């Protein structure tokens, strides 16, 4: 069987967070908050055009991240390394009734063979879904679930 991609797929996921958009947005630009649910260390706050480093110490991974667009409380776009060329991640924060926020995350810019791209999209979607679930637990209940840390308890397989 041969499958053919007619367009490069993107990773997409979303989650309702029962907190105001300003608070949810801040959780992604301030590493003091983000380390509670996603990466373990950030070298600084996201600012347009400024390269910072995010680290997942439990996996020995460190990546450069550059914010390309910051629309406070509404939208955030970053660029980070992809498999062979830079990838783009976009967060949209939509205010909802009751002071809640719907967060949408999209990653694009995947490259490689069709099989490699499908694997990258699946991994990205899973990773951002875990990060959003961890964010929800942290902001709504002050519970640090360690979902990203526990996804690969023996380290990321190469």
Image (tube, rainbow, N blue to C red):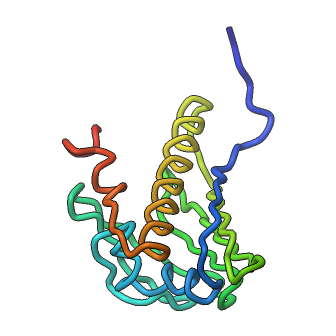
User: Which residue appears at 44% of the width and 66% of the height?
Assistant: 137
Q: Position of residue 52 (x, y in %)?
A: 40, 82
Q: Looking at the image, which is closer to me, 115 or 55?
A: 55
- Quarter of the image holding residue 68? bottom right
Q: Locate the N terminus by quadrant.
A: top right
Q: Looking at the image, which is closer to me, 83 or 120?
A: 120
User: Which residue appears at 22% of the width and 45% of the height?
Assistant: 153
With 28 as the anchor, is 99 left or right in this view? right
Relative to 153, residue 141 above or below = below
- Quarter of the image holding residue 134? bottom left
User: Which residue appears at 28% of the width and 60% of the height?
Assistant: 61
With 1 as the anchor, is 54 left or right in this view? left
Relative to 68, residue 109 above or below = above
User: Which residue appears at 78% of the width and 40% of the height?
Assistant: 7
Q: Position of residue 76 (x, y in %)?
A: 63, 79
Q: Position of residue 148 (x, y in %)?
A: 36, 56
Q: Position of residue 87 (x, y in %)?
A: 57, 60
Q: Looking at the image, which is closer to me, 98 or 66?
A: 98
């Amino acid at each position: 069987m041969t499958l053919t991609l007619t367009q490069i797929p993107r990773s997409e996921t979303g989650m309702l967070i029962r907190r105001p958009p300003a608070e949810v947005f801040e959780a992604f630009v301030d590493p003091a908050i983000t380390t509670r649910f996603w990466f373990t260390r950030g070298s600084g706050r996201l600012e347009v055009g400024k390269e910072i480093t995010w680290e997942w110490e439990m996996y020995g991974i460190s990546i450069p991240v550059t914010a390309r667009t910051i629309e406070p409380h509404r939208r955030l776009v970053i660029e980070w390394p992809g498999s062979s060329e830079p990838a783009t991640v976009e967060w949209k924060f939509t205010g909802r009734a009751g002071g809640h926020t719907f967060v949408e995350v999209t990653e694009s810019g995947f490259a490689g063979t069709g099989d490699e791209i499908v694997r990258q999209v699946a991994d990205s979607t899973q990773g951002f879904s875990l990060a959003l679930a961890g964010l929800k637990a942290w902001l709504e209940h002050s519970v640090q679930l360690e979902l990203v840390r526990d996804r690969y308890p023996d380290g990321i397989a190469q």
